[in-house]
Image: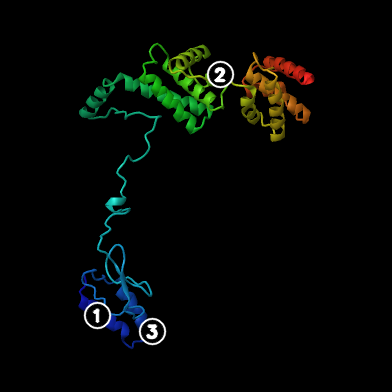
Amino acid sequence: MASSNQYSTRVTRKKSTFSNHQADSQKTAARTEKLPSAETFDTSEGCIECGESAFAKSAVGEWYCRKCGTIHSDSEIEFTEPGWRPRNERRTGAAGPVSQVTVGTKIGYSNNHAGGRWARHNNRLRHDKETLRHGLKEIRAVAAGLEATSTTTKQAAHLYRRAADNGHLIGQSIEAMAAACVHAVARKNNIPFPLDQVVEVSPVTSSDIRSAYGKLAHELKISLAPPTPIDFIERVGTEADLSQPVRRRAREIAVKLVDNQAHVGQSPTGVAAAMLYGAAQEYNVEITQEELAKAAWVSPVTLSRQWQTVRECLNDI
């Protein structure tokens, strides 16, 4: 640290009658010199910038000029690390939110003897953790294939953990239970995926997923209302690249049919596709039943049959 005599010399130099260029150079050199500490700083001297003797001490212990803001002493606190914070401002909790989608750390094999030994020990450690890891991995895969939101993925992972903690995975396929969790959460959030679409991205059959979903709903007391055609209109309309006016008209038709209970016992996805087909015809939009059936994950025969039902109901309304 520079002494107070050095600081006085610097102030005297500022008050000399050198030329403006020399004075500016000296001021620049003075700023690059090491500042005195807060304990040795003499507040009776004038500021090297404005000459005033109006000093104040900041929260970190630096003396500065209240008129021009020039800092005249080093801080009492030494900031030695990037991102340093006072102790009372430090975060003492977890580094981030606990993820429901991942579990543990997988120890891999390495070339040395110790690494292989720890990997073998890790593989024998906990079977339930390995099962949980497998199921959560399958949930991420199914959700990614369906292009589900991160919220849906996390909620499905939480539901799978509940099933695993209560021992409901026994006798069930892990892949089927994972797909059933995604299917259940999507229905709960009113963004259901057609079961055939879930089967498309899952390695198990629809009967396996139905069985797992039945056990999940029974054991965890999950009560979900059957999906209505209204729930599928936006998704099918987006897949078929239909305009907003067509989708809006399809929703109006859907509300009328649901109020009259005409959708009961029918395929909700097929009825939704039939409503979109009728709305597209009203707006003179060229789209085939095959294209809409593909977007709704139903067969063209199913859509054609549902369209007959929808048309008859519209004539009666």
Answer above or below: position of 8 versus 303: below
> Which residue ends up furthest to the front in the rendered image?
259
User: Can you tell which mark lies on residue 313?
Assistant: none
**Residue 155 position in % (x across, y down):** 45, 28
- Dot 1 falls on a residue whose secondary structure is helix
Kindly report which numbered mark, 1 or 3, lies closer to the viewer in this rendering: 1
**Residue 71 position in % (x across, y down):** 32, 70
Kindly report which numbered mark, 3 or 2, lies closer to the viewer in this rendering: 2
Mark-to-mark CA distance, 1 and 3: 20 Å
Q: What amino acid is found at the position of numbered circle 1 in the picture?
A: Ser
Q: What amino acid is found at the position of numbered circle 2 in the picture?
A: Leu
Q: Which residue in the protein does label 3 denote? A: 20
How many neighbours does mark 2 have within 10 angstroms: few (below 14), some (14-19), or many (20 or more)? some
Q: Residue at x 22, y 77 (%)?
A: 6
How many neighbours does mark 3 have within 10 angstroms: few (below 14), some (14-19), or many (20 or more)? few
Mark closer to the chain start, 3 or 2: 3
Q: Residue at x 78, y 18 (%)?
A: 316
Q: Which residue in the protein does label 2 denote? A: 195
Q: In the visual, does 186 lie left or right of 49?
A: right
Q: Which residue in the protein does label 1 denote? A: 8
Q: What amino acid is found at the position of numbered circle 3 in the picture?
A: Asn
